[in-house]
């Protein structure tokens, strides 16, 4: 009843004043059936400047009085629910229809807005996430949208090392923990950040299951954790455990999670893990994963951690010569072990 189902709904509600002179506002203005009367944004840097053929305003009441708008479309991001609610109430009170989105102001969480709109004789509708279609094709779906975190962008001040891998269960968690532990033993204030609920072993400093989050929320959760650690723990270096792989075959589902953690980490460097002859995963290999990591994120793979549990005779020296990267055994001191890998990291990031 309150969901937008076709472009005809837009025609009925047009012209719109669009709240949000950004990506969401521009996307909405391009919908078939949408006629734009004007834009409004709280960002003073955008106010008074042209956006999509309109001068961005700062006063909703004034825009309504100066245009032929019938509706106000609220296209704000997650995290701006307070501003969205303010504009929705003001628009309804001024006799405007309101169109919102599940990102900016989900109606299921604001039933009082529906009552207020009914009292004022205006319509309120939502561009929904259409989880009903997911349920139709899959038989089940979340009760509500799981994307909830504000989309922060935080640039870490101290070195961040991402520990990736060619597959699941290849040694990422152990490598992360051992690198961090070795750094702590050197007297560095190292933070060990596990992105899995299994990351419980000491001396891990913080962990959560990144896979429990919407993939859209994962980068923000990673950045937010790094920000929290830098502000509260004053680390010298941060080691972040990755999940799965960008290239592993056989199980495509965690690939997006792997990329999202990498994007949120924005690492200075990457240690790549590999398990030859993996008994129940299907890694393509070191070369492919290395290229994928360096292609999607501006970083550098600087060392290899090899899990020889299923291939004890694999030559670390041959792998090192092939890739021209320090290559050590995850579980032993062979070819220098994790201490050599840590020194590689410290040499790379400098003092």
Image (cartoon, rainbow, N blue to C red):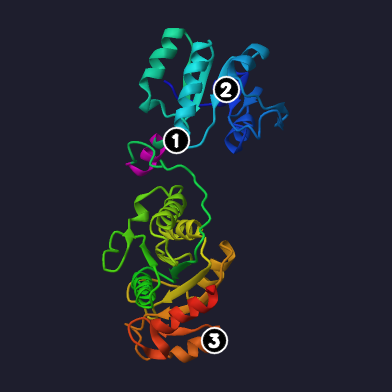
Name the element at disc 3.
helix
> Would residue 12 be seen by someone viewing this image from the given angle?
no
Residue 259 sits above or below residue 178 on the image: above
Q: Which tag, 3 or 2, sits closer to the chain's start?
A: 2
- Image quadrant in which you'd find residue 38: top right
Residue 231 sits above or below residue 187 on the image: above
In the image, what residue occupies the spot 37% across and 55% down?
A: 210
Q: Which mark is residue 180?
A: none
- Residue nearer the viewer, 187 or 62: 187
Give the residues in magenta: 132-140
Q: Is residue 297 left or right of residue 273?
A: right
In the image, what residue occupies the spot 57% across and 26% down?
A: 7
Q: Is residue 86 magenta?
A: no
Q: Which residue is mark 1?
A: 129
Tell me the CA gap for discs 1 and 3: 48 Å
Tell me the CA gap for discs 3 and 2: 59 Å
Instruction: Please rate how many residues cluster around mark 3, counting C-alpha atoms within 10 Å: few if below 14, some from 14 to 19, many from 20.
Output: few
Name the element at disc 2.
helix
> Would residue 294 be seen by someone viewing this image from the given angle?
yes
Q: Which mark is residue 322?
A: 3
**From the image, which quarter does the N terminus lie in?**
top left
Q: Position of residue 238 (x, y in %)?
A: 43, 65
Q: Position of residue 179 (x, y in %)?
A: 39, 75
Q: Is residue 25 left or right of residue 245?
A: right
Q: Which tag, 1 or 3, sits closer to the chain's start?
A: 1
Q: Which residue is mark 2?
A: 10
- Image quadrant in which you'd find residue 14: top right
Instruction: Please rate how many residues cluster around mark 1, counting C-alpha atoms within 10 Å: few if below 14, some from 14 to 19, many from 20.
Output: some
Residue 317 sits above or below residue 347 on the image: below
């Amino acid at each position: 009843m309150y969901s937008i189902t076709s472009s005809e709904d837009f025609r009925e509600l047009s012209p719109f004043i669009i709240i949000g002179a950004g990506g969401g506002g521009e996307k909405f203005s391009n919908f078939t059936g949408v006629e734009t009367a004007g834009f409004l944004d709280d960002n003073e840097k955008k106010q008074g400047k042209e956006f999509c053929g309109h001068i961005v305003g700062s006063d909703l009441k004034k825009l309504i009085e100066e245009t032929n708008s019938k509706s106000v479309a609220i296209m704000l991001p997650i995290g701006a629910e307070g501003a969205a609610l303010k504009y929705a109430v003001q628009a309804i009170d001024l006799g405007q229809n309101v169109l919102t989105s599940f990102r900016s102001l989900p109606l299921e969480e604001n039933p009082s807005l529906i009552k207020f709109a009914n009292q004022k004789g205006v319509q309120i509708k939502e561009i929904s996430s259409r989880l009903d279609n997911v349920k139709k094709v899959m038989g089940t779906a979340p009760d509500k949208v799981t994307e909830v975190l504000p989309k922060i962008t935080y640039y870490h001040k101290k070195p961040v090392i991402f520990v990736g891998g060619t597959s699941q269960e290849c040694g990422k968690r152990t490598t992360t923990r051992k690198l961090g532990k070795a750094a702590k033993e050197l007297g560095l204030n190292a933070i060990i950040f596990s992105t899995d609920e299994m990351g419980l072993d000491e001396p891990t400093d913080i962990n959560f299951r990144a896979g429990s989050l919407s993939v859209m929320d994962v980068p923000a959760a990673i950045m937010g954790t790094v920000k929290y650690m830098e502000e509260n723990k004053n680390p010298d270096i941060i080691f972040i455990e990755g999940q799965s792989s960008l290239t592993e075959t056989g199980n495509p589902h965690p690939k997006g999670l792997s990329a999202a953690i990498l994007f949120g980490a924005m690492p200075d460097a990457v240690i790549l893990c590999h398990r030859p002859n993996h008994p129940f995963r299907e890694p393509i290999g070191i070369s492919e994963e290395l290229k994928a990591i360096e292609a999607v994120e501006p970083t550098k793979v600087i060392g290899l951690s090899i899990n020889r549990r299923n291939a004890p005779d694999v030559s670390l020296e041959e792998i090192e010569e092939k890739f021209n990267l320090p290559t050590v055994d995850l579980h032993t001191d062979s070819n220098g072990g994790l201490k050599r890998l840590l020194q590689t990291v410290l040499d790379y990031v400098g003092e």
